[in-house]
Image (spheres, rainbow, N blue to C red):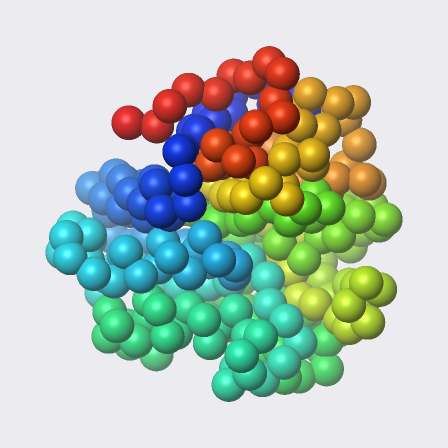
Amino acid sequence: MNDVSRRVHVLPDAPALAQAVADHVVDVARFTLAHKKRFDIALAGGSTPRAANALLAALPLRDLVDWALVRFFFSDERCVPPTDDESNFKMADETLLEPLEIAETQVFRMRGEDEPAAAARAYAGVLRRELGDPPVFDLVMLGMGPDGHTASLFPGTDPLTDDDALVRAPYVEKFSTHRLTLTPRVINAARYVSIAAGGAEKADALREVFEGPRDPLKHPVEIVAPAGGKLDWFVDAAAAAKLQTTEARPAT
């Protein structure tokens, strides 16, 4: 993976991984809000973000950020209604937005219930309107699947497809459905990007991503290389178990 400034944090287990991710959100939010009047974050789905959200919504972390100054977007979404159990928005709403009593005006969700291509175009419009053109997030949160996908950029398709569109609606053959996802152009324009990967089922992909030849077609997560250079990987010991050489250092 050809990035020279990534920071890799190896945590002992899943709870420590979630804590490190939550602490990182707080740190970036506080740093950002010390320099400007709002903090724009793109949330991710998955088990680690779910656990991190719960920590952010509880003491002591919830009192460390002025959440009224935070705006919430999404890095990807399933093409389902917001009430569906598969919805990333529903997960975020239940674990973070509702507990923190976030105002609806602070939340910008992808409309997974709409026709996929139209929903992608509409969300690109939201990003341009709210974040500029090109849009710049303060923090984009991502995960990595056992197949090396990130957001809803899956193996087998060039992750730069429709990059100028900002948001795309790829058809994911393995799930026989469309997804909505930010494109690398948006992800890599962010001031900070974090990638969380936990569990032994991620170990093979993580080894290939860190130590194998670069191949974003096989592992789309390899396309993540923020222009500002602030890329943090958060992995647990099980996911990192097959790394032979690592730039990793323990998180503090």
How many callouts does the rendering have?
Answer: 0
Q: Quadrant of the N terminus?
A: top right
Q: In which quadrant of the rendered image does the C terminus lie?
A: top left
Asked if 56 appears above or below 175 in the picture, the reply is above
Which is nearer the eye, 54 or 138? Answer: 54
Please provide percent x and percent y for residue 21.
37, 44
**Quarter of the rendering containing residue 14:** top left
Q: Quadrant of residue 226?
A: top right
> In percent of the image, x 72 and y 62: which residue is there?
168
Q: In the figure, 141 relative to 213: above or below?
A: below
Q: Tell which of 203 and 152 is nearer to you.
A: 203
Horizontally, residue 16 falls left or right of residue 173, namely left
Where residue 221 appears, as percent x and y from the top left, is 66, 40
Q: Identify the residue at horizontal 77%, vertical 68% (top origin).
A: 175
Residue at image position (46%, 25%) is 7
Image location of residue 222, percent across then percent down: 68, 35
Furthest-top residue in view?
A: 245
Residue nearest the viewer, comparing 162 with 49: 49
Is residue 101 shown left or right of residue 207? Answer: left
211 lies left or right of 54: right
* Spot occupied by residue 204 in the image (x, y as percentages of width and height): 69, 34
Residue 166 seen in the figure? no
The answer to whether any part of residue 168 appears in the image is: yes
Q: Is residue 233 above or below residue 113?
A: above
Judge left or right: residue 196 versus residue 176: left
**Residue beneath the point at 76% across and 26% down:** 214
